[in-house]
Amino acid sequence: MSRRDELLAYANTVKGFMPRDEGLALYEHALAQGERVPAGTWLEIGAWCGKSAIYLGAAGEASSSVLYSLDHHHGSEENQAGWTHFDPALVDSADGRLNTLPTWQRSIARAHLESTVVGLVGQSVVVAKHFNQPLDLLFIDGGHGRDAAWADYEAWTPKVAPAGLLLIHDVFDDPAEGGRPPFEIYQAARGSGHFIDVAQEGSLRVLRRV
Ligand code: SAH
Ligand code: MG
């Protein structure tokens, strides 16, 4: 099995919220970006257990790029006990809090992607304030509430380099299919004059900085 096939097969087994066709699209667009700009700096907001980081990391490794995978690792609202996406296996028995960091670390280690995928543990906006490296690729898949999504949009999209790729997850045209904030920030990016549409796959939107 090629390294590519091995990583793409492994990604499919990792816990998370990335449908297969969207994960493969993530990989393909990141790979093309890595061919345009080798050794790029990439960042994803929303690491969870490492699923999207492996799709992106597979492309990153092929282009000598590095992916920063950012998360506070305590889950979003909908991941907490009593909500739709709660997984009791991810609760830390020491303090009763959700903690996806150990699972994320194991995923990246098993994929042998530790030279390509680097974890950033903290709140998105706190990290953004002290992060000045231009991004060749930004994937937004963090908090989906109004405040969190807009804060990510405002803090991180200005860091996307010219011709850099902006990917946004969980964008639903039909409000019946999912929450509005990811759709709203997608519309804001298109309306800003700084980004143009490149592609879409399921709820994944791909834009490029002009
Ligand atoms: N990309 C992942 C899914 C991410 S789920 C996959 O492929 O499976 C959304 C993640 O965003 C959760 O892990 C949550 O902890 C994180 N998150 C939510 N708000 C955040 C914030 N303000 N700062 C950092 N991480 C945040
Ligand atoms: Mg998502």
Image (tube, rainbow, N blue to C red):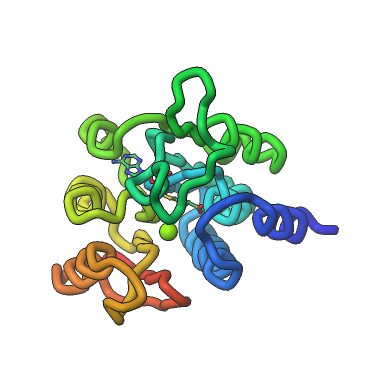
In the displayed structure image, the side of residue 145 where residue 5 appears, left or right: right
Taking depth in this image into account, of 109 and 116 the one nearest to the observer is 109
Q: Residue farthest to the bottom?
A: 174
Residue drawn 25% across the image and 37% down it: 128
139 over 69 or under it: above or below: below
The picture quadrant where one finds residue 95 is top left
Position in image of residue 180 (x %, y %): 24, 68
Taking depth in this image into account, of 174 and 169 the one nearest to the observer is 174
Answer whether residue 166 is visible to the viewer in this image.
Answer: yes
Q: Residue farthest to the right?
A: 1
Answer whether residue 210 is visible to the viewer in this image.
Answer: no
Position in image of residue 207 (x %, y %): 34, 69
Residue drawn 47% across the image and 76% down it: 201
Q: Quadrant of the N terminus?
A: bottom right
Taking depth in this image into account, of 19 and 32 the one nearest to the observer is 19
Taking depth in this image into account, of 136 and 124 the one nearest to the observer is 124
In the displayed structure image, the side of residue 122 where residue 193 appears, left or right: left
In the displayed structure image, the side of residue 70 where residue 131 appears, left or right: left
Q: Residue farthest to the front?
A: 82
Position in image of residue 89 (x %, y %): 58, 38
- Report how many numbered discs are placed on residues in the image: 0
Residue drawn 72% across the image and 38% down it: 110
139 over 102 or under it: above or below: below
Position in image of residue 71 (x %, y %): 40, 38
The picture quadrant where one finds residue 81 is top left
Q: Quadrant of the C terminus?
A: bottom left
Residue drawn 28% across the image and 59% down it: 162
Q: Residue farthest to the top?
A: 94
97 over 198 or under it: above or below: above
